[in-house]
Amino acid sequence: MSKVERKRVAHRKREKVMHNVVHVGMRIEQGLPSMRTRGALEVIHEAFRAQRSRFEFRIVEFAILSNHMHLVVEAKDSEELAAAMKGLAVRIARGLNNLWERAGQVFADRYWSRVVRKVHELRRLVCYVMQNARRHGVRIPSGRPDEFSSGPWFQHWRDHEGRTFSSEPPPTERASDMALQCARRFVLELDETPNPRPDWRTRDRGDRMTLDELLKL
């Protein structure tokens, strides 16, 4: 199937969220400029910061690719997640349209999501999101985190524990979920390429998109 024929996210029943950690993704329309530019990064960072304290919702980790982004978020419930994601999409779209001097739709589809509960799954998710550019073959300087991710503010890189690569205030928020806090303390390799094991994946197709589908993006 070509990119032009890419299927939209099916309108399946949403997975119920109750004080959970959620893997979320958003994809922009085909033909738009890449989001991996300094200007687009600043727009997205500003949207993340503007989202704080507006909902019972936190953006904890993120990765920005040329045409989509991955987020690790915390949400009180499904309604808070939906409202927060709608607001976030509007802010990012408005900012990117201003940057690109255009009007019209920015995001190609509604967001996709998956609740992740177990610590070992959360550790893989944190790695998968922050190192997603490496997974897609994007060239990142060796020994450095991807600057288009939350990696520069992560404090548990091998040989760099307790320190961050960026001195700027993070656009993300601290995790409040205990399992996610534990998962974020696992040491990650700076040049690690995510390769989730099959036991992280699920065959459940009843609620939106499965992890197996997410990991193919």
Image: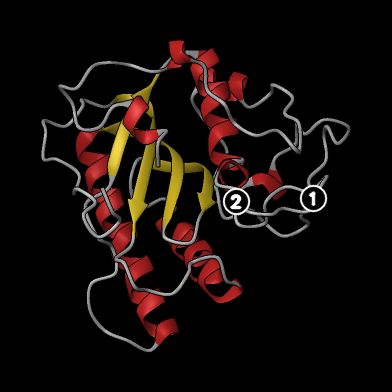
- On-image quarter of the C terminus: top left
Q: Residues within 10 Å of mark 2 (few under 14, many from 20)?
A: many
Which disc, if any, is residue 165? 1
Left of 53 or right of it: where is 176?
right
Left of 84 or right of it: where is 195?
right
Can you give x and y, in whole percent of width and height, for residue 23 in the image? Answer: 40, 34
Can you give x and y, in whole percent of width and height, for residue 94 in the image? Answer: 33, 75
Left of 145 or right of it: where is 68?
left
**Residue 97 is drawn in which quadrant?**
bottom left
Q: CA distance from mark 1 to mark 2?
A: 12 Å
Q: Residues within 10 Å of mark 1 (few under 14, many from 20)?
A: some
Mark 1 vs mark 2: in front: 2
Residue placed furthest toward the front: 1
Residue where numbered disc 2 is placed = 149
Q: Residue at 21% across / 27% down in the picture?
A: 15
Q: Residue at 76% across / 55% down in the picture?
A: 166
Q: How is the image coloured?
A: secondary structure
The residue tagged with tag 1: helix, strand or loop?
loop
Residue placed furthest toward the right: 159
Q: Amino acid at mark 2?
A: Ser
Can you give x and y, in whole percent of width and height, for residue 107 in the image? Answer: 28, 62
Q: Amino acid at mark 1?
A: Phe
The residue tagged with tag 2: helix, strand or loop?
loop
